[in-house]
């Protein structure tokens, strides 16, 4: 039987090495990487989760490109500028091209403190369906009213695509990148992760649902989608993430392996 790794002690001091608020952002983002790995949403070392560093500088945190998501810790995250270049010395490589999508949203929206992008099989499957996310489950209705779509333009290395990404997402908090994957933004790592969770679960349910065929699907009664949209508004979703879901998720990680905090 596998044994759990003993919890690693949290750093005792951080102010000397990090700007105010940066260490907290690092811990939250490292936790998000560990959770993505825990739920099986990672894609080797590919895809990215990023977070804005608090303060006036346009600096962001992103994964070291040579580490698996389950290895990432708060201190191993790399601080980069808007062009995806490291700020200060680092022993880890970064992938500037992979920051193209993230930089567009971070820079265009003040509420995009965190941006998360995945290539899960279920997310990719729904991204390849011309009708997109169907409103046939509660989870899809929670995610679907706040979702946008962006057409595939190839591997996201073209900086000119950033303008179209920003235009397509508008004021929504989630996006299906057609023929590509899923994406979420949030004013915190917590709210961003919860939105991504609902979107990924909705995609998974849709793939399972359609695997049995499209005949005899039960569509919700008229008006129900609007009701769910009201019940899962962005402000409420943020509060649910910050006050309830995220603290519980951090406790879950602490029980499994608290080294993400180091």
Image: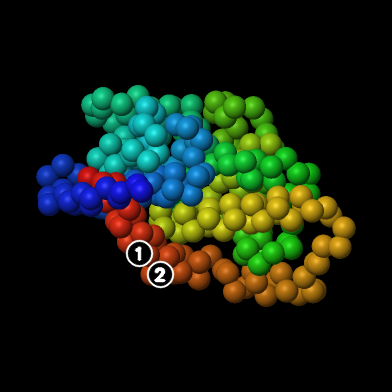
Q: Which mark is residue 61?
A: none
For the point 65% across and 72% down, the residue is: 228
Q: Secondary structure at mark 1?
A: helix
- In screen coordinates, is 235 left or right of 208? left
Mark 2 surroundings within 10 Å by alpha-carbon count, few (fewer than 14), some (14 through 19), many (20 or more) = few
Residue 65 visible in image: yes
Q: Which residue is mark 2?
A: 244
User: Image quarter for residue 254?
Assistant: bottom left
The answer to the question of whether label 1 and label 2 lie on touching residues, with beta carbons closer than 8 A, is yes
Q: Please say if 118 is above or below 195.
A: above
| Observer-nearest of 247 and 82 | 247
Residue 213: percent from left, percent from top: 83, 53
Q: Secondary structure at mark 2?
A: helix
Residue 136: percent from left, percent from top: 74, 63
Residue 79 visible in image: no
Mark 1 surroundings within 10 Å by alpha-carbon count, few (fewer than 14), some (14 through 19), many (20 or more) = few
Residue 46: percent from left, percent from top: 48, 32
């Amino acid at each position: 039987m596998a044994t759990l790794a003993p919890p690693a002690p949290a750093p005792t001091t951080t102010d000397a090495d990090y700007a105010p608020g940066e260490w907290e952002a690092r811990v939250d983002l490292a936790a998000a990487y560990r959770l993505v790995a825990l739920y099986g949403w990672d894609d080797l070392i590919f895809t990215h989760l990023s977070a804005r560093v608090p303060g006036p500088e346009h600096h962001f945190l992103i994964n070291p490109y040579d580490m698996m998501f389950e290895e990432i810790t708060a201190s191993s995250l790399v601080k980069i500028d808007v062009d995806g270049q490291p700020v200060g010395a680092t022993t880890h490589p970064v992938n500037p091209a992979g920051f193209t999508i993230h930089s567009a949203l971070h820079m265009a929206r003040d509420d995009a403190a965190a941006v998360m992008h995945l290539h899960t099989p279920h997310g990719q499957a729904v991204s390849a369906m011309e009708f997109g996310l169907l409103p046939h489950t509660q989870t899809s209705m929670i995610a679907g009213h706040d979702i946008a779509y962006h057409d595939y333009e190839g591997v996201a290395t073209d900086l000119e695509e950033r303008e179209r990404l920003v235009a397509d997402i508008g004021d929504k908090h989630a996006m299906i990148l057609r023929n590509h994957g899923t994406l979420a933004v949030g004013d915190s790592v917590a709210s961003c992760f919860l939105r991504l969770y609902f979107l990924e679960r909705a995609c998974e349910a849709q793939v399972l649902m359609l695997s049995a065929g499209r005949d005899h699907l039960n569509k919700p009664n008229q008006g129900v989608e609007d009701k769910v949209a009201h019940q899962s508004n962005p402000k409420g979703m943020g509060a649910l993430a910050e006050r309830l879901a995220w603290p519980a998720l951090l406790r879950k990680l602490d029980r499994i392996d608290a080294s993400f905090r180091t």
